[in-house]
Image (cartoon, rainbow, N blue to C red):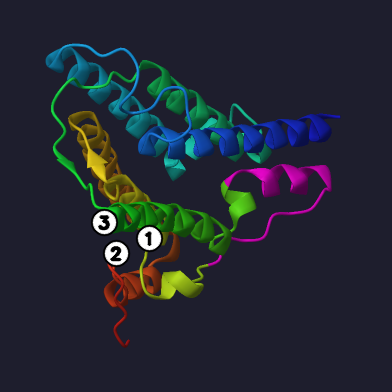
Amino acid sequence: MRALLSFLYGVAAYAAGLVVLLYFIGFSGNLLVPKSVDTGAGAGWAAAVGVDLLLLALFGVQHSVMARRGFKRWWTRIVPAAIERSTYVVATCAVLALLFWFWVPIQAPVLWQIDGRAGSALAWGLFGLGWLLVLVSTFLINHFELFGLQQVFARLTHRALPEAQFKTPLLYRYVRHPLYLGLLLSLWSVPRMTAGRLLFALGLSVYILIGIAFEERDLLAQFGERYRRYRAQVGMLLPRRSRP
């Protein structure tokens, strides 16, 4: 029964993660959502920046701390290991929902805007390409493990999870973090950049760079010299591949 409940919890967490991810796309691009980065009740410049920075910091702390190996060792003494990743997804959804709900648009002039049809189409094309990179990258590194489904399914079927292996499939042969590259591309490739949109993009870009540093530290601890050689040969965010 516990295995079944864990599986249902994992499926619900996965579904919530997909919904929040889709809303994130609409929120960041001001597309088809009731409240986005530039819509909703505004406030004075100082108040808006203060609230928005607090929301970005909350997301960064939650997303980074819960992903660390030391936290996971402590956390799995409280929750079953099979639902650790699903719980991480649920916590991320909750923090992002708070960010979407309480984000305050900044009442300031537009910093830049691309009015030409070709330029606007190029910007939106890069925005879409960024999110496509994110999606493809999740499947290259095991989409269902990343969102917690593999773990709860293994518990339901009484199967052991495979040992973590160091792999560099397709995009990972040329850039170490194609998922983060896709996020950065989507954050900056919009035809209209407001002050609020700039704060959102800057805040998440800083988080991504900090997150990469922590993630690579964990990967070095896990895979040692093999990851050190990989890091020397392949670019972090810009495609590069040198010979061993």
Residue 115 lies, with reference to residue 136, above or below; the image says above
Comparing labels 1 and 3, the label whose residue is closer to the camera: 3
Which region of the structure is painted magenta?
147-165
- Quick one: SS at disc 1? loop
Element at badge 2? loop
Please, is residue 183 above or below residue 167 in the view? above
Question: Against 225, is 125 above or below?
Answer: above
Q: Is residue 195 something one can see in this rendering?
A: yes
What is the crowding at mark 3: few (fewer than 14 residues within 10 Å), some, or many (at least 20)? Answer: some
Quadrant holding the N terminus = top right
Residue 236's image quarter? Answer: bottom left
For the residue marked with disc 3, what is the amino acid?
Gly
What's the residue type where badge 2 is placed? Met
User: What separation in Å lies between label 3 and label 2 (alpha carbons)?
Assistant: 28 Å
- Would residue 76 be seen by someone viewing this image from the given angle? no
Q: Position of residue 57 (x, y in %)?
A: 29, 28
> In the drawing, what numbered circle is on residue 236?
2
Check contact, mark 1 vs mark 2: CB within 8 A: yes
On the picture, is 156 further left or further right than 74? right
Q: Residue furthest right?
A: 1
User: Badge 1: few (under 14), some or many (20 or more) residues near its Cα, within 10 Å?
Assistant: some
Instruction: Indicate which disc residue 101 carries.
Output: none
- Going from N to C along the chain, the mark reached first, 3 or 2, is 3
The C terminus: image quadrant: bottom left
**Whole-percent x, y for residue 140 in the image:** 55, 64
Amino acid, disc 1: His
Distance between the Cα atoms at labels 1 and 2? Answer: 6 Å
